[in-house]
Amino acid sequence: MFTDDVAITVGAVLGVILGAVLLTMFIQNYALDKDEAGLSKLDYFFGAQSTIVPVTNYSVQQAHLVCSIEIKRKQGASLQTMTYDSRSSRFVSRKKMFKVFYDLTFENEKGKSERSWAYCDVSSTTGKLLEIRLKTDSRSLFGF
């Protein structure tokens, strides 16, 4: 039925088709998919650099909203008060992010109110939460 020549020909045709499909997928994912600077992953691989400077798109109010929602989610029902610390909160221009601070009071496991603080780093270009830190005050004499 099949001779060696036919089997080799069918294998070669299937290899060419498979190669064409893989090449097409590679080109679509790495060469045609361009970012806001008009550069693809392949361009970056070969050393191209974006000349676009990110624009500050989000405000400190939006960063405050993102952070406060996450703190409320993490602390849950134990959170009693949360006060925005406008003196400490700031925009860090070299990192293109907002550092948003809060003074917190929450109920501990013993049912007593405990003071705490929190801060979030929120990207000014994407509005995403980059980092969140929640800390309780130490109750020892020297703060150790």
Image (cartoon, rainbow, N blue to C red):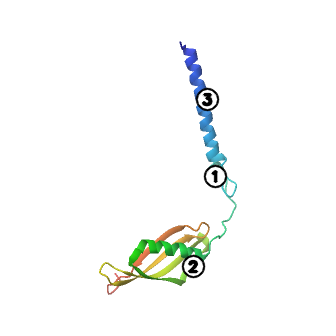
First in residue order: circle 1 vs circle 2: 1
Return the x and y of residue 141 as percentages of the image width and height: 32, 87
Q: CA distance from mark 3 to mark 2?
A: 58 Å
Residue drawn at point x = 51 percent, y = 82 percent: 84
**Please, is residue 29 above or below residue 69 in the view?**
above
Return the x and y of residue 2 as percentages of the image width and height: 54, 14
Taking the image as shown, residue 135 lies to the left or right of residue 59, namely left
Return the x and y of residue 69 as percentages of the image width and height: 50, 73
On residue 62, the disc is none
Q: CA distance from mark 1 to mark 3?
A: 29 Å
Give the label, 1 or 3, closer to the camera.
3
Residue that carries the numbered disc 3 in the rendered image = 16
Q: Amino acid at mark 3?
A: Val
Give the label, 1 or 2, closer to the camera.
2
Circle 2 SS class: strand
Q: Amino acid at mark 1?
A: Tyr
Circle 3 SS class: helix
Q: Residues within 10 Å of mark 2 (few under 14, many from 20)?
A: some
Disc 3, disc 2: CB below 8 Å? no
Circle 1 SS class: helix
Residue that carries the numbered disc 1 in the rendered image = 44
First in residue order: circle 1 vs circle 3: 3
Q: Residues within 10 Å of mark 3 (few under 14, many from 20)?
A: few
Residue 5 falls in image quadrant: top right
Disc 1, disc 2: CB below 8 Å? no
Residue that carries the numbered disc 2 in the rendered image = 90
Residue 26 falls in image quadrant: top right
